[in-house]
Image: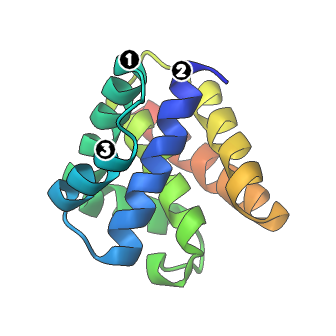
């Protein structure tokens, strides 16, 4: 598994922890990295950057997702799906050198691993639509 994929999976876990445990980003970082202390520096670095973006811009990210997820509110989405979307949208917004297709493909691979088969199509459609909007902006 590549460095960035590992980072993205860690970010999903961190966002899931924050979401389900109703924890602040600081609480998540403290407990998460205590349990994952052996993670390589470059993997942790990208994960930290992506988690920071996702948590700093949650309102903006959630708004984008809801606009593009027709008839779905964030609180009605599966927790894993919601956080895969948050992580990928954060990356689309803050890491423009990573091609949109790569971000979407990585999110789909993570969804295949951690979510249901039905979720993959949903996540793909939302991210493709969000990505097109962000490219126009």
Q: Residues within 10 Å of mark 1 (few under 14, many from 20)?
A: few
Mark 3 / mark 2, whichever is N-terminal: 2
- Cα–Cα span, label 3 and label 2: 17 Å
Q: At numbered mark 2, what does the secondary structure look like: helix, strand or loop? A: helix
Q: Which residue is at a point 19% across and 61% down the rendered structure image? A: 27
Looking at this view, name the residue that lies furthest to the bottom: 76
Query: Does the CB distance between marks 1 and 3 fall below 8 Å?
Result: no
Judging from the image, the colouring scheme is rainbow
What residue is disc 3 on? Answer: 33
Mark 1 / mark 3, whichever is N-terminal: 3
In the rendering, which numbered label is found on residue 42?
1
| Quadrant occupied by the N terminus | top right
Query: Does the CB distance between marks 2 and 1 fall below 8 Å?
Result: yes
In the rendering, which numbered label is found on residue 5?
none
Q: Which residue is at a point 24% across and 50% down the rendered structure image? A: 29
| Rendered location of residue 67, percent (x, y) | 46, 66
Depth order, front residue of 90/7: 7
What residue is disc 2 on? Answer: 3
Q: At numbered mark 1, what does the secondary structure look like: helix, strand or loop? A: helix
| Rendered location of residue 17, percent (x, y) | 39, 65
- Cα–Cα span, label 2 and label 1: 7 Å
């Amino acid at each position: 598994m590549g460095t960035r994929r590992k980072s993205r999976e860690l970010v999903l876990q961190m966002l899931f922890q924050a979401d389900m445990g109703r924890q602040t980003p600081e609480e998540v970082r403290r407990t998460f990295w205590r349990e994952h202390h052996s993670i390589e520096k470059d993997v942790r670095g990208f994960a930290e950057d992506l988690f920071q973006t996702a948590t700093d811009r949650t309102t903006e990210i959630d708004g984008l997702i809801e606009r593009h997820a027709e008839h779905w509110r964030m609180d009605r989405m599966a927790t894993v799906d919601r956080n895969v979307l948050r992580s990928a949208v954060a990356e689309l917004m803050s890491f423009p050198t990573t091609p949109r297709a790569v971000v979407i493909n990585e999110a789909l691979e993570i969804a295949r691993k951690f979510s249901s088969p039905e979720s993959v199509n949903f996540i793909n459609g939302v991210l493709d639509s969000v990505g097109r909007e962000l490219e126009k902006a």
